[in-house]
Amino acid sequence: MKWIIGATLFWLGLASTFADTDSPVGRWKTFDDKTGRPKSIVQITEQNGELSGKVSQVLESLQGPHPLCRPCEGERKDQPVEGMTILWGAKKDGASWSDGQILDPENGKIYRVTLTPLDGGRKLEVHGYVGVSVIGRSQTWQREE
């Protein structure tokens, strides 16, 4: 009987591990669109069914080691990019998370966003757009181990 309980707990734990890899929750390395070089680390969390993403580290910036969001408006204007929430409001929608928003600190613009885990949760397609989703730009982020 103990063996059956142990095996059941093992498989439940294993199943939850695989399920978690299909979630955007975790640390992600972002890349520069032009150079392809690592740009930042974004920590995505989930609270009350909504995702939020914060820049935990800037790896490379034209402004230097501690860039400010100069083109941003409102409370983000001239604030450090490190520690800034750049993703918010995305909710689970099938295999993706949608209806959220994402800020591009380089131009200060806010876009609608859809997040889709790829490659068993090791990659994350981040699609930002204005209006309809077919018009927009996608990036692929890599999960930090």
Image: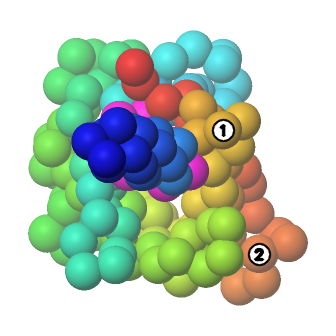
- Mark yes or no: residue 24 visible: no
* Residue topped by disc 1: 120
Image quarter for residue 63? Answer: top left
Q: At label 2, which amino acid type do we have? A: Ser
Report x, y in % for residue 43: 29, 43
Residue at image coords 28%, 56%: 45
Image quarter for residue 42? Answer: top left
Magenta stretch holds residue 27: yes
Residue 133's tag is 2
Magenta stretch holds residue 79: no
Depth check, front residue: 128 or 18 = 18
Secondary structure under the numbered disc 1 in the rendered image: helix
Measured along the vertical axis of the image, is residue 22 above or below residue 109?
A: above
Q: How is the image coloured?
A: rainbow
Residue range in magenta is 21-28
Report x, y in % for residue 120: 66, 38
Q: Is residue 38 left or right of residue 139?
A: left
